[in-house]
Image (spheres, rainbow, N blue to C red):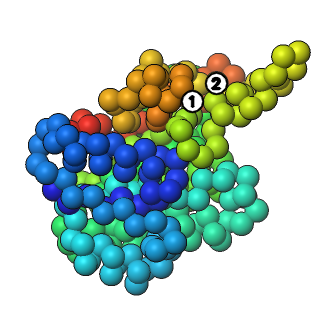
């Protein structure tokens, strides 16, 4: 099976490629894996011609597409860039995959919801993004074909990139008081939920990659990230 991965230098993309390489070397299950993972300096997903050429040349069976501009505040300041990368980039990936018959797995976000639901969100709940970032990621979802896979993630923590765990560790000093906003709620999973197989011992007490099933942006809400199709389709690769 040939797998093409975008956004490979990002927090999620790095872990996906590492896990795929591990499985390719150990041949844990299923067909042999051939992993193609161009860095952003080589492939700009906002460049249609480049995306069509890259995926068209490789002809993968699966395209895993975590590449995105995820700087929420920066997206507000530069919505054109947010839509160019998150919407149009996904359009080009979906178009290229369609031409070669590849299945797309798109990493989206819980920011497509407004966080006001009094109950956990379901896949069939209507999105209502409040930010440019959320709207741009929802736009990316709508570029996909009905048979493609959407995984909505929240509270991502990994060994690379910036995340909440690293921020707390960096700020945690004896005698220092940590201050945080109190209108964001979430639940940490007991183990990594997107890339199983890691344990906390592999990264000095922090899971290699964690995508929590819950997040809310308003008090009293416990909102699970949702995925269309089965996560087993990812785990079995």
Q: Secondary structure at mark 1?
A: strand
Task: Say whether residue 202 is left or right of residue 72.
Answer: left
- Local packing at callout 1 (Cα closer than 10 Å; few below 14, some 14-19, many 20+) is many
Q: How many labels, in total?
A: 2
**Image coordinates for residue 204, horizontal then vertical, percent:** 54, 25
View extreme (top): residue = 175
Q: Is any atom of residue 19 visible in this view?
A: yes
Against 97, residue 175 (above or below) is above
Is any atom of residue 120 visible in this view?
no
Residue at point 58%, 59% (across, down): 69
* Image location (x, y in percent) of residue 22: 29, 43
Q: CA distance from mark 2 to mark 1?
A: 6 Å
In the drawing, does residue 57 fall left or right of residue 124? left
Query: In screen coordinates, is 23 left or right of 73?
Result: left
Residue at disc 2, secondary structure = strand
Using the image, determine if residue 203 lies above or below residue 47: above
* Of the pair 53 and 36, the residue shown nearer to us: 36
- Residue 94: mark: none
Residue lying at 39% horizontally and 57% vertically, measured from the top left: 65
Q: Quadrant of the N terminus?
A: bottom left
Asked if the residue at tag 1 contacts the one at tag 2, i.e. Cβ–Cβ closer than 8 Å, the answer is yes
Determine the residue positioned at 21% across, 58% down. 34
Decide: few, some or many residues near mark 2? Use Cα within 10 Å; few <14, some 14-19, many ≥20: some
What residue is shown at x 55% (from left), y 44% (from top)?
160
Q: Nearer the viewer, residue 44 or 103?
A: 44
Of residues 189 and 78, the one drawn nearer to the viewer in this rendering = 189
* Image quadrant assignment for residue 144: bottom left
Residue most extreme to the bottom: 49
Mark 1 highlights which residue? 215
Mark 1 or mark 2, which is nearer the start of the sequence?
2
Tell me the residue that label 2 is attached to: 185
């Amino acid at each position: 099976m040939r797998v093409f991965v975008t956004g490979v230098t990002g927090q999620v993309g790095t872990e996906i490629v590492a896990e795929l390489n591990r499985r390719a070397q150990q041949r844990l299950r299923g067909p042999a894996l051939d992993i193609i993972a161009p860095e952003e300096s080589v492939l700009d997903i906002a460049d249609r011609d480049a995306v069509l050429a890259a995926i068209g040349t490789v002809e993968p069976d699966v395209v895993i597409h975590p590449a995105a501009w995820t700087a929420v505040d920066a997206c507000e300041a530069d919505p054109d860039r947010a839509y160019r990368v998150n919407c149009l980039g996904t359009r080009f990936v979906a178009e290229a995959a369609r031409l070669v018959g590849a299945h797309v797995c798109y990493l989206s976000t819980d920011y497509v919801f407004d966080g006001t639901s009094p109950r956990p969100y379901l896949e069939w709940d209507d999105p209502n993004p409040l930010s440019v970032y959320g709207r741009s990621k929802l736009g990316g979802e709508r570029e996909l074909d009905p048979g493609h896979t959407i995984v909505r993630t929240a509270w991502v923590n990994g060994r690379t990139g910036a995340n909440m765990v690293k921020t707390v560790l960096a700020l945690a000093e004896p005698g220092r008081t940590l201050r945080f906003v109190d209108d964001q709620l979430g639940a940490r999973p007991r183990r990594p939920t997107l890339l199983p197989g890691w344990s906390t011992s592999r990264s000095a007490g922090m899971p290699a990659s964690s995508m929590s099933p819950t997040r809310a942006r308003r008090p009293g809400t416990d909102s699970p990230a949702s995925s269309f199709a089965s996560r087993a389709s990812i785990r079995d690769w």
